[in-house]
């Protein structure tokens, strides 16, 4: 697969509370955002994600020398990694060290300019670094038991599990051997993902067979009129939560 076609994972290392609103805004724009709070484990994980983007809060955890060394080592060992700095410190000399000496590609962002302006700068930076790739929607893989669905089908309730989810649609596997025709309209599908409940409607647009279980996985695209802006934003937040849980597990293993 062509490099970057599925977009890039965006990490915020030691994100301060003032970034919460900014990160939520980036998630709503369909950037695949993750939070990390262990620079050692993240460093090991990044070696498996050579084209990720990392924003480092240099006000936390390490001192100035420690962060300069950390970023310098990343620049040397992972040349495909995009790095940016976030800080509350308006220090011109520090800015010069990161931008001129270390040549970080994703900027030196001062956080005291307000959430709206910070989100705008970070969004433009991510766009410039092709963080979305050609992907329009962030996708979350759902481990067994993570996401469930139920829908009325001719008077009977069809239940099953989600295998993945985006704000545009889902892939779902019924509990039984039910196989739906492509084009089937599913009205008022009840989704339950990590305690979050949503009601959507959708159309089966494709299906694939899982020979190991003898069941079909159905690809369902949500109908636009079943998702108002509030529901869509809730769905994006749930997707981000599922992805973060998977990333947390990956960081623990790193």
Image (cartoon, grey):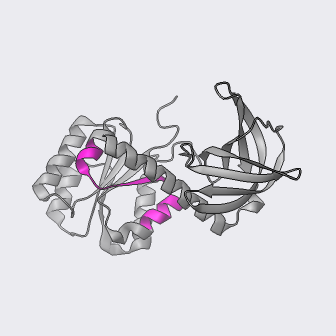
Is 185 a magenta residue?
no
Q: Nearer the viewer, residue 206 or 177?
A: 177
Q: Residue lying furthest left in this view? A: 65
Quadrant occupied by the C terminus: top left
Residue at left offset 33%, top offset 40%:
253
Asked if 17 appears above or below 148 in the picture, the reply is below
In which quarter of the view is residue 8 placed? Answer: top left
Up-down: is 160 above or below 196?
A: above
Q: Residue at 70% of width from left, 41% of height from top?
A: 175
Q: Which residues are magenta?
A: 22-43
Looking at this view, is 215 or 76 the one in front?
Answer: 215
Q: Quadrant of residue 160?
A: top right
Residue 29 belongs to the span the image colors magenta: yes
Residue 155 at x, y percent in the picture: 88, 53
Residue at x 44% of width, y 47% of height:
246
Q: Position of residue 64 (x, y in %)?
A: 13, 58
């Amino acid at each position: 697969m062509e490099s970057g076609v599925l977009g890039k994972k965006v990490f915020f290392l030691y994100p301060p509370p003032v970034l919460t609103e900014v990160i939520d805004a980036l998630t709503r724009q369909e950037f695949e955002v993750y939070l990390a709070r262990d620079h050692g484990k993240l460093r090991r994980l990044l070696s498996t994600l050579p084209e990720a983007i990392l924003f480092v809060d240099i006000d936390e955890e390490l001192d100035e020398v420690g962060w300069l060394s950390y970023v310098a080592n990343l620049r040397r060992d992972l040349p495909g990694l995009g790095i940016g700095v976030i800080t509350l410190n308006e220090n011109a000399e520090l800015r010069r060290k990161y931008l001129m000496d270390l040549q970080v590609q994703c900027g030196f962002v001062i956080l005291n300019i307000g959430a709206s302006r910070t989100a705008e700068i970070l969004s433009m930076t991510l766009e410039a670094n092709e963080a979305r790739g050609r992907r329009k929607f962030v996708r979350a893989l759902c481990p067994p038991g993570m996401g469930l669905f139920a829908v009325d089908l001719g008077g009977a309730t069809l239940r099953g599990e989600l295998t993945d989810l985006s704000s545009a649609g889902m892939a779902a596997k019924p509990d039984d051997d039910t196989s739906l025709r492509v084009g089937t309209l599913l009205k008022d599908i009840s989704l339950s993902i990590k305690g979050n409940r949503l009601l959507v409607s959708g159309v089966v647009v494709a299906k694939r067979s899982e020979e190991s279980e003898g069941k079909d996985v159905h690809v369902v695209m949500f109908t636009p009129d079943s998702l108002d802006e509030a529901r869509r934003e809730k769905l994006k937040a749930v997707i981000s939560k599922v992805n973060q849980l998977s990333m947390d597990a990956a960081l623990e293993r790193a």
